[in-house]
Image (spheres, coloured by chain):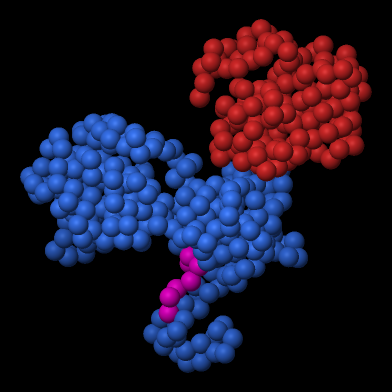
Chain colours: A red, B blue
């Protein structure tokens, strides 16, 4: 497992306490899991995601990640309508391990309340939270 | 030598001692004195050859489930030791279903042997594997875990169907014989069966997950559920990364597999549901899971 100072924590995304990230791109929010999450889960083998068009609330479970070590739920970092899911993950779930902020993105959401993003953490705050966990 | 699951040395030693009943035998629990490491995989012979003093002697005529050497300095053979003089017992066995060795030595030599083997195998890709990797391999190889998957109830089948006086439906005996009562009881008892799923999704055995039949009735519990990542489906056929007939470009996604303990014997191929608090998955009862395993293949194919 990576040390906290070895984690890739880009500053163009916001982080949730449950280790999802959210990146505002125009009027939509792209969602994935953090480098910390993928590192702790280990090799990810399967992902379950919602249907395009589903409406989910902030904090609601939107899918599960299956890894060689565990099964983990993913929670919405912002509520809204699912506009797209990354279908490449069906065949290549390892993208979540190798490119968690790029090709391993999971969802695109049209937020019902963009102000919910303000409750998420920036890079520094998230790194500080992680230091308190390990 | 009986190699038992971690933590079971004392209870099994006590059980054997209790049942000596005057026989000319002695039971010694070696738990604290004996170290063991497993070297498994297609390069196992080439790696172990680098640390053996006389690899050409040790690796000659060493078929599956045979062994050579001794872990005790006083009983050891000059032929079966490592380059550094460590006496070892080398066994063509393992708990993965794949080609490899179990290596036994005095526990005070274990760390040094571990480091030497990892170093010698670095160029061939030798890596340390954790319990989860071992667990997925042994489940795919249909190897149950003692006191988890198997216990005082039947595992799949006894091997005597061809010889016993079954009726046409193979359910009752047509005449009495010594031991028929026990076998009848076994047929009605709980059974352990292996299963394989359709993708890597697992259920938790901690909750525990239950087994449901086609009518939705609770018929048992899940005792092992892991994902064997070396296998995948192409239609109804399961291939492994070692399958010579695997489809071109085959990239396994992994399949969930393991064992269930059910109230009565289930036919091979029967579909059941495994349900935990998170999900319900369909799996099939199977008599084999990961095809083309390498454990029994001749050693000469791997050198």
Say if B65 sits above or below B69 in the image. below
Q: Residue at x 36, y 61 (%)?
A: B296
Quarter-of-image position of residue B233? bottom right
Q: Where does residue A112 sit, x and y in percent of width and height?
A: 92, 23
Magenta span of residues: B154-160
Question: Is any atom of residue A49 visible in this view?
Answer: yes
Which residue lies most toward the right here?
A112
Q: Quadrant of the N terminus of chain B?
A: bottom left
Which residue lies most toward the front here?
B248
Magenta region, mostly helix, strand or loop?
loop
* In front of the other: B49 or B207: B49
Q: Where does residue B200 sit, x and y in percent of width and height?
A: 62, 47
Question: Is any atom of residue B70 visible in this view?
Answer: no
Quarter-of-image position of residue B206? top right
Say if B21 sits above or below B275 in the image. below
* In front of the other: B70 or A39: A39
B296 on left or right of A32? left
């Amino acid at each position: 497992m990576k040390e906290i100072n070895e984690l890739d924590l880009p500053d163009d995304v916001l982080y949730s306490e449950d280790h999802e990230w959210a990146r505002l791109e125009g009027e939509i929010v792209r969602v994935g899991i953090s480098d910390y999450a993928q590192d702790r889960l280990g090799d990810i083998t399967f992902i379950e995601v919602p249907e395009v068009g589903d409406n989910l609330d902030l904090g609601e479970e939107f899918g599960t990640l299956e890894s060689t070590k565990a099964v983990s739920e993913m929670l919405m970092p912002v509520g809204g309508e699912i506009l797209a899911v990354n279908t490449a993950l069906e065949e290549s779930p390892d993208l979540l391990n190798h490119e968690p902020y790029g090709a391993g993105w999971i969802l695109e959401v049209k937020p019902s309340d963009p102000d919910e993003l303000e409750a998420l953490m920036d890079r520094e705050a998230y790194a500080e939270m992680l230091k308190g966990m390990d | 030598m009986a190699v038992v699951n971690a933590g079971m040395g004392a209870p099994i030693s006590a059980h054997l001692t209790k049942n000596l009943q005057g026989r000319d035998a002695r039971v010694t629990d070696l738990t604290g004195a004996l170290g063991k490491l497993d070297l498994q995989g297609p390069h196992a012979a080439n790696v172990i050859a680098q640390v053996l003093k006389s690899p050409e002697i040790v690796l000659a005529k060493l078929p599956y489930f045979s062994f050579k050497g001794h872990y005790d300095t006083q009983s050891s053979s000059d032929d079966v030791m490592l380059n550094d003089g460590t006496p070892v017992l080398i066994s063509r066995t393992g708990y993965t279903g794949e080609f490899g060795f179990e290596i036994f030595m005095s526990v005070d030599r274990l760390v040094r042997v571990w480091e030497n083997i990892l170093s010698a195998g670095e160029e061939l890709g030798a890596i340390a594997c954790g319990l989860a990797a071992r667990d997925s391999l042994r489940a795919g190889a249909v190897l149950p875990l003692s006191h988890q998957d198997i216990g005082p109830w039947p595992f799949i089948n006894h091997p005597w169907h061809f010889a016993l006086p079954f009726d046409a439906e193979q359910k009752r005996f047509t005449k009495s014989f010594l031991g028929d009562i026990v076998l009848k009881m076994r047929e009605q008892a709980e059974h352990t069966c292996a299963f394989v799923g359709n993708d890597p999704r697992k259920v938790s055995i901690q909750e525990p997950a239950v087994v449901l039949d086609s009518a939705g009735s609770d018929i048992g519990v899940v005792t092992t559920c892991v994902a064997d990542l070396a296998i995948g489906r192409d239609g109804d056929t399961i291939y492994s990364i070692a399958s010579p007939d695997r489809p071109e470009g085959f990239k396994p996604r992994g399949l969930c597999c393991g064992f269930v303990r059910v109230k009565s014997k289930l036919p091979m191929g029967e579909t059941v549901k495994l349900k935990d608090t998170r999900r319900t998955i369909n799996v099939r009862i199977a008599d084999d899971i990961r095809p083309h395993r390498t454990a029994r293949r001749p050693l000469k194919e791997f050198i």
